[in-house]
Image (tube, helix red, strand yellow):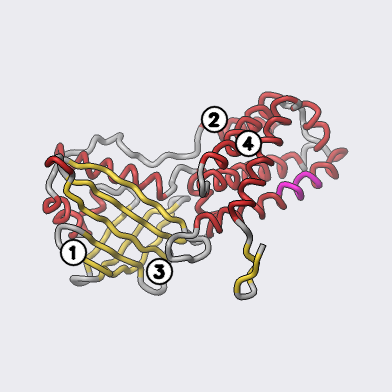
């Protein structure tokens, strides 16, 4: 642990490893002794639910150890924490005789959530070094020339055709544009952006202007593929969700994570350019999963 300008900084990799071992240990306990664990924290004995949650914990732990900077897996722990806190909050009203034990368990989970969020913020900081920034990189190869792809992308008003989350983009002048984007919960956010760099047929870079509801920057590169096999399109994006890492994690939980959106958008770009159309069912935004809703509703109803 170290300080930087009065702010506490942690060794995020060491913390991630500790959280990984915690996930695996807790997950194994939930899988092997679900009834005993339920009685200990004062909730209803639901072995199947506890084992499913345990499998999630073990998967997160293994995922953390599988990468040098496991930001996505630590964020998955935050998503799991949100679900656990929701279930515990529901359990507080189910049985007054065990309310004290449930409250202690809730406090413990809240403490672990704080560590998960801190670790996720450190691991997710993009190249700009801003705390809480999320960095996304995606690549696709398209069987068209760099000139054709650059020409399409350079007119930003074309982008809503391939990006489901975009409501509209309006070019204000040769460098600036206004963006309106869907956000979780059926609302929208918007901002003005400007191009920061441009190499015709090779590179476009942009960033949001001051006052943007979502601070973001990024670039798209068009590289001629070897052997005349089209163009390699590389998109990099750095953004800071309005609610930080928790906001990004909740967006993932509801199927609207920008890293997933970018991958889908690039696939739609490839389809449109290569075939001239995009199937209607391709890349539709995902909602809350039915299985997640059933687990929650079953727990609350008892």
Judge the density around disc 4: few (<14), some (14-19), many (≥20) Cα neighbours within 10 Å. Answer: many
Label disc, if present, on residue 291 of the rendered structure = 2
Q: Which of 57 and 45 lies nearest the eye of the viewer?
A: 57
Residue with the mark numbered 3: 212
Dominant secondary structure (helix, strand or loop) of the stretch shown in magenta: helix
Check disc 1 and report the residue beneath it. Answer: 199
> Which of disc 2 and disc 1 is earlier in sequence?
1
Q: Is residue 79 left or right of residue 267?
A: right
Chain part drawn in magenta: 104-109
Mark 1 touches mark 2? (CB < 8 Å):
no
Q: Are marks 1 and 3 in contact (CB under 8 Å)?
A: no
Q: Is residue 273 visible?
A: no
- The residue to which callout 4 is attached is 57
Q: Nearer the viewer, mark 3 or mark 4?
A: 4
Residue placed most toward the observer, 182 or 253: 253
**Picture residue at 70% right of the left edge, 35% below the top:** 25
């Amino acid at each position: 642990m170290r300080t930087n300008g009065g702010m506490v900084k942690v060794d995020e990799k060491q913390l991630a490893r500790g959280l990984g071992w915690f996930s695996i240990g807790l997950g194994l306990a939930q899988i092997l002794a679900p009834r005993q664990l339920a009685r200990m924290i004062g909730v209803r004995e639901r072995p199947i639910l506890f084992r499913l949650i345990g499998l999630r914990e073990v998967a997160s732990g293994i995922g953390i150890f599988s990468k040098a900077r496991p930001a996505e897996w630590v964020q998955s722990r935050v998503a799991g924490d949100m679900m656990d806190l929701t279930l515990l909050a529901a359990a507080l009203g189910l049985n007054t005789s065990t309310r004290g034990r449930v409250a202690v368990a809730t406090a413990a989970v809240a403490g672990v959530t704080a560590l998960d969020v801190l670790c996720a913020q450190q691991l997710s900081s993009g190249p700009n070094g801003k705390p809480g920034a999320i960095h996304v990189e995606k690549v696709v190869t398209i069987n068209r020339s760099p000139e054709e792809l650059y020409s399409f992308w350079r007119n930003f008003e074309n982008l809503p055709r391939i990006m489901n989350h975009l409501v509209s983009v309006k070019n204000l002048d040769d460098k600036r544009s206004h963006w309106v984007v869907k956000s979780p919960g059926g609302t929208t956010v918007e901002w003005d952006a400007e191009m920061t760099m441009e190499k015709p047929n090779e590179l476009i870079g942009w960033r949001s202007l001051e006052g943007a509801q979502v601070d973001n920057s990024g670039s798209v590169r068009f590289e001629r593929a070897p052997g005349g096999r089209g163009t390699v399109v590389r998109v990099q994006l750095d953004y800071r969700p309005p609610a930080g890492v928790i906001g990004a994690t909740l967006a993932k939980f509801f199927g609207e994570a920008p890293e997933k959106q970018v991958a889908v958008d690039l696939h739609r770009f490839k389809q449109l350019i290569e075939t001239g159309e995009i199937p209607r069912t391709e890349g539709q935004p995902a909602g809350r999963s039915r299985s997640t809703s059933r687990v929650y509703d079953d727990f609350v109803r008892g």
